Image (cartoon, rainbow, N blue to C red):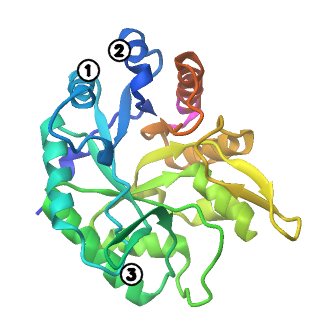
């Protein structure tokens, strides 16, 4: 069985850790109260990355975010990879572990992308089985993140929100609500982001993410948003966050920036804006 008490992030701002920010973060974190790392960047046996991570873990709660388990894939989970992730989480006393509702492997090849799934009964059974295996292997409750979508599958017979709610009910996992992903998917697929939030099981949310996106147009001239993590959080995403917090109350809130990473004062300024949003949220 897994231990649900191991998800202990504070209801406060966090940032995705980048090595270039190590000195500034440890000397003057500002509004930042926790950090997130990508698991696959820290699976080695030593060196500066693990030394920096040990120092961070001594000062901040650390959320471990996986990008390589391919939980939605048809192939069995990689047990060796799971073992390495377990060792990492145990070594630093990870406050949370999360992954994506997506797949990224096929016939032994890793595709370096987070690809969408049809929401069917067969997919639900497979993902539930994989989530059970992850939680059993890690000995802790995990959070599963809603994807950013660029197309919808004709064979889907579940809404995404109902699919996630049922998955969490069957497995006991929590959910990671990425507000930028909601906005990106709603724009690309032509529905109202506010309606998605109204249907989302907010009581199951253990962490909220914010990020930036790129605005393009498709071949028909329609808006197309790309979840790039390469720009500041857009104003409509901040507004959507206020709606989420009004309904859900304060939650751990992360700013992600993986491309065109800014100087520390700029990233901390977004974390400070998260703190103000949390202050406005009802208890």
Q: Is residue 167 left or right of residue 172?
A: right
Residue 7 rendering spot, x and y as whole percentages:
26, 45
Residue 17 rendering spot, x and y as whole percentages:
40, 31
CA gap, disc 3 and disc 1: 38 Å
Q: Which residue is mark 2?
A: 26
Name the residue: 56% across, 30% down. Answer: 261
Q: Nearer the viewer, residue 83 or 183?
A: 83
Q: Which residue is mark 1?
A: 59
**Which mark sits nearer the N-terminus, 2 or 3?**
2
Q: Which residue is mark 3?
A: 124
Q: Is residue 112 left or right of residue 224?
A: left
Q: Is residue 23 left or right of residue 88?
A: right
Residue 207 rendering spot, x and y as whole percentages:
42, 46
Q: Is residue 152 left or right of residue 283?
A: right
Name the residue: 53% across, 72% down. Answer: 160
Q: Nearer the viewer, residue 195 or 137?
A: 137
Give the magenta-colored segment's residue range.
278-283
Q: Between tags 2 and 3, which lies in front?
A: 2
Asked if marks 2 and 1 touch (Cβ < 8 Å), the reply is yes
């Amino acid at each position: 069985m897994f231990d649900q008490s191991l998800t202990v992030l504070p209801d406060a701002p966090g940032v995705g850790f980048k090595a270039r920010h190590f000195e500034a973060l440890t000397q003057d974190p500002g509004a930042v109260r926790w950090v997130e790392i990508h698991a696959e960047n820290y699976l080695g046996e030593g060196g500066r990355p693990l030394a920096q991570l040990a120092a961070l873990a001594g000062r901040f709660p650390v959320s471990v975010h996986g990008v390589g388990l391919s939980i939605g894939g048809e192939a069995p989970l990689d047990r060796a990879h799971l073992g390495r992730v377990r060792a990492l989480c145990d070594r630093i006393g990870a406050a949370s572990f999360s992954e994506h509702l997506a797949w990224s492997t096929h016939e032994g090849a890793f595709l370096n992308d987070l690809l969408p799934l049809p929401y069917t009964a067969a997919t639900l059974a497979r993902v539930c089985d994989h989530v059970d295996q992850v939680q059993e292997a890690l000995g802790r409750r995990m959070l599963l993140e809603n994807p950013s979508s660029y197309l919808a599958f004709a064979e889907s017979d579940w809404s995404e929100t109902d699919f996630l709610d049922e998955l969490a009910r069957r497995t006991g996992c929590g959910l990671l609500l990425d507000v930028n992903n909601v906005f990106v998917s709603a724009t690309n697929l032509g529905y109202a982001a506010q309606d998605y939030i109204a249907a989302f099981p907010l009581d199951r949310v253990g962490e909220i993410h914010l990020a930036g996106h790129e605005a393009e147009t498709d071949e028909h001239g329609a808006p197309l948003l790309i979840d790039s993590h390469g720009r500041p959080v857009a104003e409509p995403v901040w507004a959507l966050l206020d709606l989420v917090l009004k309904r859900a109350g304060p939650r751990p809130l992360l700013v992600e920036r993986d491309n065109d990473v800014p100087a520390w004062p700029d990233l901390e300024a977004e974390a400070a804006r998260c703190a103000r949003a949390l202050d406005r949220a009802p208890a």
